[in-house]
Image (cartoon, grey):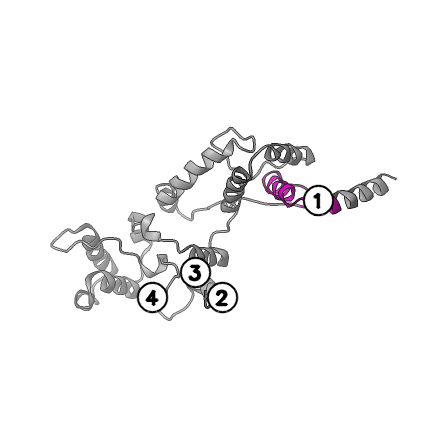
Amino acid sequence: MQNYVDLHRHAAVRAGLLDHPGTALRLMVAHAIAGSSLWQVRCEPQRAAKETVAASLAACKAEAAFAEKRRAVLALPGQPDEDVTVVGRYGDGYDTAHVFARLLTLSDDDVMRVLTIVMAETLEAGSAVIEALGHHLKVDMAACWQPDDAFFELLRDKEIANAMLGEIGGKHVADGNVAEKVKTQKKIIRDFLAGENGREKVEAWLPRWMKFPVESYTARGGFRTADQWARVQPLFAGQ
């Protein structure tokens, strides 16, 4: 009998929901935040392979901007703690209902603010979605990222370092240093970026790896970001 009651009540409620898209939006956001036995949504953990990578990300302008906007949104669904994510309040159906009830009191604009943070928290790093979204939004990496110590520490390929030197210092400089160690070529690149040691300062240089759309430096393959973009690029042809 319990099963009978559950299924008929479920059928009636979900049929009624179809005529109320605004309510469905709030209910979906509540499920993304608090979960259920059918919803399992997780934040992107942003796991760093090295401490230097973690430190670089922590100092990133984009991370600071996101954290500021998230703090402003956290209280809207009833989460006053500024040091937590919006997504991840998993419990029983009561928790989801609690968030849902809170969202029903908010304007459409505020619900959309919450939804935007929820979606941003759950974007998967390194996925084809990042390449598609970055292209669609025309994300300007130069506005939020500059080459830092961690970037140069991880740059260890001599051929690629020489290609980057060509971008930033010109073909003559790159050809003149093609036989130099990668450490030496990286030092020259940094001199150009800082305008030191007689090098003319170069502003807002972006390596091909950081552009949207992304580009490769060699034809060797194995660059996952470029592979991801190659998969989704046909979906945006003509846009």
The quarter of the image holding the N terminus is top right
Label 3: element kind = helix
Q: Mark 2 = which residue?
A: 231
Q: Which of marks 1 and 2 is nearer the N terminus?
A: 1
The residue that label 1 is drawn on is: 17
Image position, residue 26 (x, y; %): 61, 40
The residue singled out by tag 3 in the image is: 225
- Residue lying at the far top of the rendered structure: 80
Residue indicated by mark 4: 217
Spatial CA span between label 1 and label 2? 36 Å
Is residue 145 in view from this perspective?
no
CB atoms of marks 3 and 2 within 8 Å: no
Q: Which-is-in-front pick, marks 3 and 2?
A: 2
Choose the circle earlier in sequence order: 3 or 1: 1
The x, y position of residue 57, in whole percent, is 38, 44
Crowd around label 1: few <14 · some 14–19 · many ≥20 (10 Å): few
